[in-house]
Amino acid sequence: MPTLSLTLRRLLLGLLPLLLTTHAWAAAPARTVIDCELAGSSQRLALLRSAAFVDSFIYRLRHGTQTWLLYNSEDDSLGMNVQWQCVATGTNSHLLLLSGEFTANYLQGAAFYWDPQGNQVQRIDFAERNRPGWVQVTAQGPRVIFNNVGHESSHRYLVYGPRDAYEELDQLPTGLIKLHAKTD
């Protein structure tokens, strides 16, 4: 039976802690936390996450064969207490909404929807002190509505829409969809 030389055994034993540490820090594979059919099964958007720390995850999105980070970098896409929901917005139409603690002092999030005119996934970004309460579907696209709990303005509701649209309202508009976000 072959034996290892004393020098080789010492080298391997010396490298063992390094190998174990490297394995512990290796990136965990991303797993799907929700699949949302934005406009039927051909326009499915998946929210993926991979473990980074004990209670923080790096979030990515996948549409077809393309996968990208939620924000510009892994550091910016590292979030905790993230909630998500696939919201039915019409016949064969959904919106993927998520919010959580990322890099800002506020809760950050985004709503993703299929734009049939542009034939692509569109995004509405937001950052507020609380999570969104409603979605409204309009001819211009979906709008994400918040209670104004931070009182940054004198209006009761804050509204984010497509193409960086922002509005402040004193009354809720009609035709709202109440949100009930989930976590894993």
Image (spheres, rainbow, N blue to C red):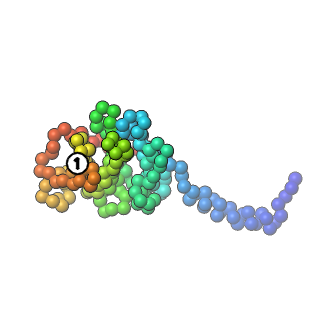
Percent x, y of residue 31: 49, 45
Q: Secondary structure at mark 1?
A: strand
Residue at 15 percent of width and 45 percent of height: 172
Percent x, y of residue 92: 33, 33
Residue situated in front as seen by the camera: 132 or 70? 70
Quadrant for residue 22, please give it: bottom right
Residue situated in front as seen by the camera: 120 or 135? 120
Q: Residue furthest right?
A: 1
Residue under pointer 1: 145
Quadrant for residue 135, please give it: top left
Residue at 57 percent of width and 57 percent of height: 26
Residue at 65 percent of width and 60 percent of height: 19
Percent x, y of residue 96: 35, 43
Residue at 26 percent of width and 55 percent of height: 164
Q: Is residue 147 left or right of residue 75?
A: left
Q: Amino acid at mark 1?
A: Ile
Percent x, y of residue 157: 17, 51
Residue situated in front as seen by the camera: 134 or 80? 134
Q: Residue furthest top?
A: 91
Q: Quadrant of the C terminus?
A: top left
Number of numbered discs present?
A: 1
* Crowd around label 1: few <14 · some 14–19 · many ≥20 (10 Å): many
Kindly tell me whether residue 116 is visible in this rendering: yes
Kindly tell me whether residue 85 is visible in this rendering: no
Q: Is residue 51 left or right of residue 84?
A: right
Q: Residue furthest front?
A: 117
